[in-house]
Amino acid sequence: MVDKKKGKVVKAASPPEDEQPNLHQLDSQLGMFGVVLMLFCGTVSSYLFTSLPDALTRADLESYPGAFIAERAWENLKALNDIGPKPTGSEANEKLTADYLKREIELIRASKHRNQDVLVEHQVVTGGYPIAFMGNPLTSIYRNVQNLVVKLPGENDNGTNPVLMLNSHFDSVASSPGASDDGASVAVMLEILRVISRQPVRNRYSIIFLFNGAEETPLQAAHGFITQHPWAKQVSAFLNLESAGSGGKEVLFQSGPQHPWMIDVYARAIRHPFAHAVAEEVFQSGLIPSDTDFRIFRDFGHVPGMDFAHMIEGYRYHTKYDNIDYLSLPVLQRTGDNILALTREMVNSDELANAGNEETTKGYSVFFDFMGLLFVCYSTDAAITINSLVAILAVLMPYFGLSRSVRRLGEATIIKEAVYGFLATVLGTVMSLIACLIMGRQLDAMGRALTWFSTPYLILGLYCCPALLCHCFAQVIVNKVFADKKTPLNLSQTVQSRLIGVSLFWALLVIPLTFFGIRSAYIFMVLLLVSVMSSLVIAVMGFQNTTRKWLAVHLGFQLLAMLWATQYYHMFMKLFVPISGRSGGSKNPEYLVGSIAALCTLLIGSYMMPLVQLLKRASELISRLTVFILIALLMACFTQVGFPYRDDSAKAPTVQRHYVTHVLRVYHDERGLIRDTDSGFLFREMDRNSVRMIRGVASPEEVIPMRQMNTCESEIFCAVPFYSMWHQIRFDNYWLPGPEPTTDDGVVSLAYQGREWLSENRTRLTFTMEGSTQSSLIVGPKPGVKLVGWSLIDEVPATVFNGQLGHFALITHGLPGEPWNVTMDFEYADKHYEGLLADVAIVTTFWEYHEKHTQDFTKLINKFPSWAHVIPSVAAMNIYVF
């Protein structure tokens, strides 16, 4: 260029050095290619996560003799489904379902091979035990609940040989046919019994099939079997079949405790593995508001076992949509294939015989599968070596590979850039978590909680894109702050050094988790292992000084890492998104889902984030991610897509749950005379949006929060008709005054029989309880008085509600029973005490009581929209003082 005034040649101004083209940089459009790769891996893992095998029919019997036939199991499931809801104590459960199972078992016995034997016992059992749910201690009492127990004897069964037990339950919650929970498991067990009983050769050890009739109550019939049935003494291991969803793969989510041999047998036997140690640790952390019979067999029978459950489509769990219309034959086929193979392997193994030996009981296993294609297990001792070695190699191997290519001149720079990569990963993680929590807070403040409940894809835009955006910003910030214009490394080598920092981040997480005994560290170890393999190939091929060749190898291995990581995204979202619809309204579910999204984004994309430096303009990727976030926000807040709930018109119901109880409360004075009565409706707040629906249904009347009722000042536990402390205490409930319900018959009565002075400071009260409806007993000692004993069980568990110490007993009736006496022993410090001893409340709860609903109750229920699932009940509460 010539300056005409001075006649001199002037050089054109150069762009800033950080904007000058770099031979190692890539076109900015390729930034979206990385996002597309993540979505592609997520799609593939989603397909593999939900894929099921083809179902076998009777036509396949000749080709597959001795195989599980889903068609036969489906016929059993249909019969169970057609009975309808089967709460314990109902005719549907105690007669129709029990009689059907007896007939099916007799048919199986009639068709058995002549070399087999099928022993059947019908157990009607009464008992009790102390237990705590969600931190709330209580007494669990059951009377005349039923178990149908079948034994398939093995070779030379002498009554002391080890036995494997399979367990499922045939009862359901009210309003739900229980096709998945747990009818499908019952059908699977019937078919396994059918198949094994027809084989010509007996197994080495016996098998017990326990069909229990009181699990939802909860967990009571299992206690009756494991503590009172004579066959229980032989049980050396068990397989528990459950459901927390509606279909899909069954996941092994609890094993042991300890007894690592069980995982070894699983590894040998299972055709379609789906098992993760992280599932066990998450379940046992208390994050999931459920429990299973596994707990009873473990704690009261001291027997090791495995807990299996279907987990996807938890929207239908415990609703009317848990029916056969939303299940398929392949679901039964997959579960049947696995449990049949595991049963055969276990009852013919040496491990079952040695299950009681001390050397086989100790230790835990780390176990996981890769997309159902590969199953891996090893001991926690081996995990210390494996995780530590992989973590060290993931940092050192790429470092030495790069050092060899840049000589000594750049070794210190590699370390420095690795530290920057570590800082960028930490900064991106913190920023993404904060961003997702802020997003969740704002959505909730706008009244838009759970917009993703029916459309989980919105989570990608609402939370995953902001998390990605924060990681991009973190990379840009670190580049700006720590830019080194004199670096001896080219851009490709700089990015590779930053990736060492990512490995350092995971290594510093894996090693402490491993030494603290957190088995889930394997998730991060696998990411490091993929990095080690990638670094090894790059070093052997000498690609450190290139861009495209090195990048191709890195991305090829990252496809494996992203497939691995995206399966955990699907697992956690398919579990926790439906759970957010039954976790109460006191906590913001956006925080949990947003945090999971942020952490899963880190897991999936941590080794992709440093590649942002290779782009000529990172701003284009940032702009596109911003657009996606805005689109997701618009869809969530201003379109029907963001409405949380759906009815079954599209055959994909995602309903809002409501428990509504029509209540009659009768208050008695110390003479037993009625001093007051009231009535109304009790609503339970099941999710973050429930209270708006409750207030809308009650309008123009105002509902009263449970802890603000007038009765909280004078009555035991606010005179709330609790039927299950663990359900109702952890949720907010609302009271609406209203007319009385119909409770003509079946109300459990508590008749005072008299008192006996056991000593100068101890008194025993005797009562007679009559009635066989589901009930609960609440005892609140007066100040200065303690309940020190009662005839229900040896222990006296206590709980606190509304600042009051009380004792809660859940009482379940299966078959009708006779009146029974209950004694309570009270102790007081003052030897001359002559005052009142306690408030005593008896609550009777009627489920499946539709024919006795009043017009007012029916009208109230009908005010709920089609996308709401209402579980109605009627309760009568009598409160006494003695």
Image (cartoon, rainbow, N blue to C red):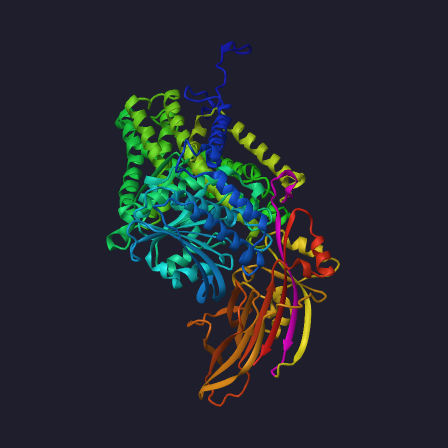
Magenta region includes residue 653: yes
Q: Is residue 355 above or below residue 552?
A: below
Q: Is residue 191 left or right of residue 861?
A: left
Furthest residue in direction right, as rendered? 700
Highlighted magenta segment, given as a residue range? 645-670
The quadrant in which residue 323 appears is top right
**Where residue 399 appears, x then y in whole percent?**
30, 31
Q: Residue at x 49, y 27 (%)?
A: 31
**Where residue 414 appears, x then y in whole percent?**
32, 31
Residue toward you, 546 or 60: 60
Please identify the quadrant where the C terminus is shown.
bottom right
Q: Is residue 268 left or right of residue 599?
A: left
Furthest residue in direction bottom, as rendered? 832
Q: Is residue 176 left or right of residue 26?
A: right
Q: From this viewpoint, is residue 510 visible?
A: no
Magenta region includes residue 321: no
Q: From this viewpoint, is residue 699 visible?
A: yes
**Where residue 774 appears, x then y in whole percent?**
56, 64
